[in-house]
Image (spheres, grey):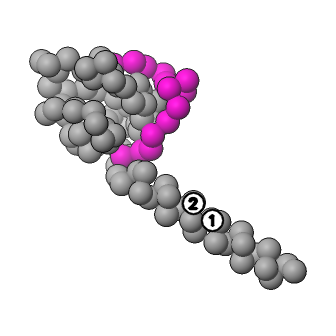
Amino acid sequence: MFKALRITIIAATLAAGAAHASVNPNPQFGMAAAPANADRHIVIKADTKWVNVDNGDTVTFEIDGKSFTWHFDTLHSEQAFDLAKIAPAGINAGMVTVYVASNPLYRG
């Protein structure tokens, strides 16, 4: 009985991991988050070229009336990448660069 339970738990864990990987194709930049958890709200306009965030921030981005929320958890202390890499399908992030600074709690 315990062996069957252990196999069921392992299978469920692997399935959840596979589902998460398909939802979050770029885990090196962080993960999608619930809008209620956002620390900041950034509106991306046609003339927006870049945004600045800190590692550890949770930000809701609004683009053309659509929005998504992202928790930044990068592998490096500083990182820059295109917002389009984390924007969900159906949201056109354009050519906006995200600059992620190190977390202020750990700056020396």
- Residue at 13%, 33% (x, y): give it: 95
Where's the N terminus, which quadrant? bottom right
- Residue at 40%, 25% (x, y): give it: 60
Percent position of residue 7, x then y: 72, 77
Which mark identifies residue 16?
2
Q: Is residue 52 left or right of residue 3?
A: left
Percent position of residue 24, x then y: 41, 51
Residue 61, located in which quarter of the rendered image? top left
Counting labels gives 2
- Residue at 49%, 55% (x, y): give it: 20
Residue hosting label 1: 13
Q: Amino acid at mark 2?
A: Ala
Query: Which residue in the rendered view is the most extreme toward the right?
Result: 1
Q: Is residue 67 magenta?
A: no
Q: In terms of secondary structure, where does tag 1 sit?
A: helix
Q: Amino acid at mark 1?
A: Thr
Q: Please tell me which residue lies in front, 89 or 33.
A: 89
Q: Is residue 97 left or right of residue 74?
A: left
Where's the C terminus, which quadrant? top left
Contact flag, marks 1 and 2 (Cβ < 8 Å): yes
